[in-house]
Image (spheres, rainbow, N blue to C red):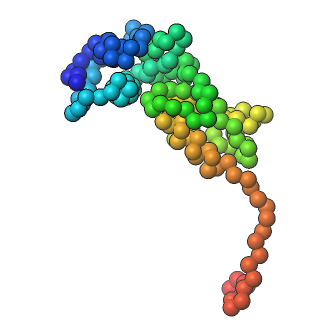
């Protein structure tokens, strides 16, 4: 539990609890209150910590050498980890995901997906390779991938003929 605790002190406590090394941007200032009714595992505490950072306008970006950099959210898209999984894991971490589409032109999906993203996130279409490059929080990237799967369907030109038995097809 942290009551109006300095963010720097919270980072130190989370570092000790999780064994992670943090590199903190000097602009990170502020206080946070985190209250838990029962003890949390180190993994759950880390997710709560990431949520607290997000509320303060900061995010954690995994870096080389087991160092987690805490930077302003607006800069995270330049430093986001590239997810090599089909679906990124994590919740409140910013990741970059490359999504391949088969039946739709990627640039046609941009106006549909962009309103579903935070202003600090990024979305780019590369039509020659049929890919979308998405940088956002991992939980939102998973949601966007689900939407892309629903929209990326083959367009058929087949016509179904339905014979009428007790009605007229003529318009009145």
Image quarter for residue 141?
Answer: top right
Q: Residue at x 43, y 22 (%)?
A: 59
Residue 13 visible here: yes
Vertically, is 137 above or below 9? below
Q: Position of residue 45 (x, y in %)?
A: 33, 26
Vertically, is 62 above or below 104? above
Vertically, is 14 above or below 104? above
Q: In the image, is 167 to the left or to the right of 67?
A: right
Q: Nearer the viewer, residue 12 or 154?
A: 12
Q: In the image, is 6 to the left or to the right of 131?
A: left
Image quadrant in which the C terminus is located: bottom right
Count of labels shown?
0
Q: Nearer the viewer, residue 44 or 69?
A: 44
Q: Position of residue 100 (x, y in %)?
A: 69, 37
Image quarter for residue 70?
Answer: top left
Q: Residue at x 52, y 9 (%)?
A: 65
Image quadrant in which the N terminus is located: top left
Image quarter for residue 60?
Answer: top left
Residue 124 visible here: no
Q: Nearer the viewer, residue 41 or 54?
A: 41
Q: Residue at x 74, y 37 (%)?
A: 130
Q: Position of residue 36 (x, y in %)?
A: 24, 31
Q: Position of residue 144 (x, y in %)?
A: 56, 41
Farthest residue, direction bottom: 166
């Amino acid at each position: 539990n942290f009551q109006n605790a300095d963010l720097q002190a919270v980072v130190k406590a989370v570092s000790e609890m999780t064994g992670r090394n943090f590199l903190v941007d000097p602009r990170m200032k502020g206080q946070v209150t985190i209250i838990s009714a029962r003890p949390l595992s180190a993994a759950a505490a880390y997710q709560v910590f990431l949520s607290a950072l997000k509320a303060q306008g900061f995010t954690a970006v995994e870096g080389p050498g087991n160092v987690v950099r805490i930077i302003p959210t607006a800069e995270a898209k330049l430093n986001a980890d590239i997810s090599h999984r089909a679906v990124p894991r994590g919740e409140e971490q910013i990741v970059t995901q490359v999504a391949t589409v088969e039946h739709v032109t990627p640039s046609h999906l941009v106006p549909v997906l962009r309103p579903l993203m935070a202003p600090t996130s990024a979305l780019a279409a590369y039509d020659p390779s049929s890919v979308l490059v998405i940088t956002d929080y991992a939980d939102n990237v998973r949601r966007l991938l689900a939407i892309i799967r629903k929209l990326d369907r083959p367009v058929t030109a087949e016509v179904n003929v339905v014979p009428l038995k007790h009605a007229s097809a003529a318009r009145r």
